[in-house]
């Protein structure tokens, strides 16, 4: 996450520098050398934090052409040049603009001005909770439905195969078997529920040397379609070290922004558990199973999906331990 400050006057620039001394980040003054529009065009990216020191109107006009949706927009805040108020105006929850407003306001002795209804009324914000639990949001159109119910004092039903530590917030009900409006799962869910996907799955992969990128991608698609596993659940891909430069494998990881974890045959052989065995694989790489063992070692967890083989590619999945917690809201 990178912070970028844009000021329009000398006084505003001094305030931006004071903020940056506490938080890090780059300070710019409009017109030197970039205009506000050029500065916004360069820095309006997911994961960034943009802080305008000046009028809200200038900030709104600057960011308007770039706004897409709440899951991809960066955090945008405005502070007046006197340093009295800090106002998050975009991506308050998912982009953490509300959190940054509190942080910056504390550092300079200002007042954070939060306008999101859930914050103003102290109501549970499911999107912010999911972000803090390292969960991806799917079917995000249902965020509004859930938030509206909570703001109206109505119940929202959660379903999770993992026990959630702590006391549920007001009007959050947990179910194991009934219909739920919010489902925590690494597997695909109907579009009429808000699907929260823990990023806890390590994909273990083995493949024939020289397998084409196209064939590799086809086998990956087949695996996800057959198992229903969500791509959003992945946190890493794991394999044997002789595959660390396999083009199809490295391209898949790069395209999906996933780290590739590789292990020696000795490290894989030392993983405890019962795994499917192949004499051919044993003779070729020195261990009888790559995908399941690599997945378990990478996740430091247990097998979620056993080995599936097709088209010269073997795939398995293991999941890390996961303990979601309500307590951050306290």
Image (tube, rainbow, N blue to C red):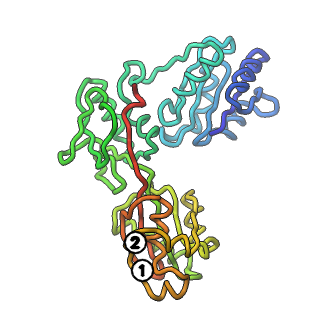
Disc 1 from disc 2: Cα separation:
9 Å
Q: Residue furthest left?
A: 178
At x 52%, y 59%, the residue is 236
Q: Quadrant of residue 26?
A: top right
- Say above or below: 146 vs 292: above
Of residues 194 and 108, the one nearer the viewer is: 108
Q: Quadrant of residue 32?
A: top right
Disc 1 versus disc 2: nearer the observer: 1
Q: Which residue is mark 1?
A: 310
- Say above or below: 316 vs 176: below
Q: Earlier in the sequence, mark 1 or mark 2?
A: 2
Relative side of 145 to 40, left or right = left
Describe the element under mark 1 as helix, strand or loop: strand
Counting every numbered tag in the picture gives: 2
Q: Residue furthest right?
A: 32
Relative side of 310 to 22, left or right = left
Rate crowding at label 1 as few (under 14), some (14 to 19) or many (20 or more) other CA atoms within 10 Å.
some
At x 18%, y 48%, the residue is 177
Of residues 177 and 46, the one nearer the viewer is: 177
- Which image quarter is the C terminus in? top left
Describe the element under mark 2 as helix, strand or loop: helix
The image shows residue 242 at horizontal and vertical percentages of 61, 76
At x 28%, y 26%, the residue is 170
- Say above or below: 85 vs 38: above
Q: Which residue is mark 2?
A: 222
The image shows residue 173 at horizontal and vertical percentages of 23, 35
Of residues 147 and 245, the one nearer the viewer is: 245
Contact check, label 1 and label 2, Cβ < 8 Å: yes
- Say above or below: 94 vs 262: above
């Amino acid at each position: 996450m990178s912070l970028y400050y844009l000021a329009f006057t000398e006084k505003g620039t001094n305030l931006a520098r004071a903020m940056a001394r506490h938080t890090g980040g780059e300070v710019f003054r409009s017109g030197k050398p970039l205009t506000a529009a050029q500065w916004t065009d360069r820095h309006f990216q997911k994961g960034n934090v943009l802080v305008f020191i000046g009028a809200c109107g200038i900030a709104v006009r600057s960011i308007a052409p770039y706004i897409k949706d709440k899951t991809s927009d960066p955090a945008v805040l405005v502070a007046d040049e006197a340093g009295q108020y800090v106002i998050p105006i975009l991506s308050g929850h998912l982009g953490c603009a509300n959190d940054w407003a509190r942080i910056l306001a504390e550092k300079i002795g200002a007042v954070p001005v939060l306008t999101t209804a859930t914050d103003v009324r102290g109501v549970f914000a499911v999107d912010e909770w999911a972000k803090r639990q390292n969960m991806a949001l799917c079917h995000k159109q249902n965020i509004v439905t859930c938030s509206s119910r909570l703001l109206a004092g109505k119940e929202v039903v959660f379903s999770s195969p993992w026990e959630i530590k702590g006391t549920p917030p007001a009007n959050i009900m947990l179910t194991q078997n009934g219909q739920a409006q919010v489902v925590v799962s690494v597997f695909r869910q109907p579009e009429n529920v808000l699907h929260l996907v823990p990023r806890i799955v390590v994909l273990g992969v083995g493949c024939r040397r020289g397998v084409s990128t196209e064939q590799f991608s086809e086998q990956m698609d087949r695996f996800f379609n057959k198992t229903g596993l969500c791509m959003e659940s992945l946190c890493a891909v794991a394999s044997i070290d002789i595959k660390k430069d396999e083009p199809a494998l490295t391209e898949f990881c790069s395209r999906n922004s996933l780290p590739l974890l590789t292990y020696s045959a000795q490290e894989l052989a030392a993983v405890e558990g019962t795994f499917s065995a192949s004499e051919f694989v044993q003779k070729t790489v020195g261990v009888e199973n790559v995908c399941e063992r690599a997945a378990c070692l990478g996740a430091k967890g247990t097998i979620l999906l056993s080995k599936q083989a097709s088209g010269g590619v073997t795939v398995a999945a293991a999941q890390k331990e996961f303990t979601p917690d309500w307590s951050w809201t306290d």
